[in-house]
Image (spheres, grey):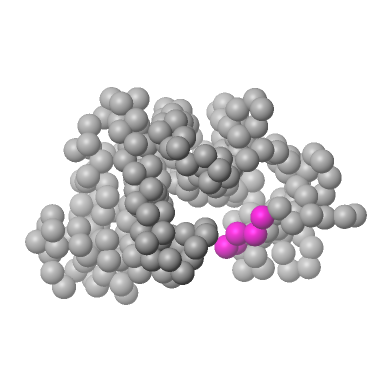
Amino acid sequence: MTRLLLSHGKTELVLSTDARTVVKFFHPTVSRERVEREVAQTRRAKDYGIRVPDIYDVIQQGDRFGVVMEYIQGPTMTDILSKAPYRIHAYARQLARIQAEINAVDVSGFTEQSSLMRTAILQTKARLGEEGSAHIVRLFDQLPQANRLCHNDLHQENLIFTRTGPVVLDWAEATVGHPIADVVHTLLIQKHPVQAPVLQNSSLYHRLHNAYRRYFARIFLNEYLRLSGLDREAIDPWLLPVAATRLFTKIEPEEKDWTEHYIRGELLTNYSYKR
């Protein structure tokens, strides 16, 4: 069987097996339980009316587990904006609409956001100190809870645009919880500085590229607030707890360093906390 490498991420690689299916092979460190959770949550999201790839099977090849799934053909949002950056307003607003549609769904059967976040925040002691993590736990415990569908990793690479509309990928981190936490995940992903795709030795282009990402985040948030009827003040209390949660996820070390710096800045500026 001929296989074509389609993408290679931090925890998986995706191979095309034919015109209709792909196999998403996970890193050898990813357990079968983790893979089966992603499969179950993807199927559950589809049951609730979200456009996701069909899942066909879980396989094992050597020390890797893989998921056989529908081949979704089309460009990602990143692909589209790299060729047409002037379309930033339309696509930032579309991401907000997709997020709002996901977050509007009352669900059950997904991982509980509240317990997951609390556990993750407590695990940040090594970076933030016991007092710092305890302070963020206290902030988190004051926040409201909900039973809405949250993706928790929604960004431009996880949206493929087909002839019949966008399809949402990668449901491994999905939870049932409060939608504002999900929105803040998306904001922090977008605000985190990344290496520019071209002219990587140019500091000017690096700054421009990340200014573009931050501008995208502002358009996205304004549209989400408009659609949801929320105001900006509803977002702020979630910034620190969600940022602390991201320290416990499988993000790159450089992103963890940036997130820690962001948290310390927020603590110092808004809560007069020093370590």
Q: Which residue, as the protein is rendered here, is positioned at the far right?
A: 1
x, y (%) of residue 20? Answer: 80, 39
* Most foreground residue, 153 or 223: 223
Q: Give the range drawn in magenta.
A: 7-11
Within the magenta stretch, is there residue 102?
no
Taking the spot 36% from the left edge, 59% from the top edge, the residue there is 207
x, y (%) of residue 80? Answer: 56, 40
x, y (%) of residue 92? Answer: 42, 36
Q: How many circles with numbers are drawn on the protein?
A: 0
Is 41 on the left or on the right of 15, as rendered? left
Q: Which residue, as the protein is rendered here, is positioned at the far left?
A: 272
Report whether residue 111 is seen: no
Report the quarter where the C terminus lies: bottom left
Q: Is the magenta stretch mostly helix, strand or loop?
A: loop
x, y (%) of residue 113? Answer: 40, 46
Report whether residue 164 is seen: yes
* Most foreground residue, 114 or 15: 15
* Most foreground residue, 31 or 155: 155
Is 189 on the left or on the right of 28, as rendered? left
Within the magenta stretch, is there residue 10?
yes
Q: In the figure, residue 51 lies in which quadrant?
A: top right
Q: In the figure, residue 217 lies in which quadrant?
A: top left
Q: Is residue 241 depicted above or below 90 in this figure?
A: below
Taking the spot 23% from the left edge, 58% from the top edge, the residue there is 136
* Most foreground residue, 141 or 75: 75
Taking the spot 34% from the left edge, 51% from the top edge, the residue there is 211
Is 200 on the left or on the right of 19, as rendered? left
Report the quarter where the N terminus lies: bottom right
Taking the spot 71% from the left edge, 53% from the top edge, the residue there is 6
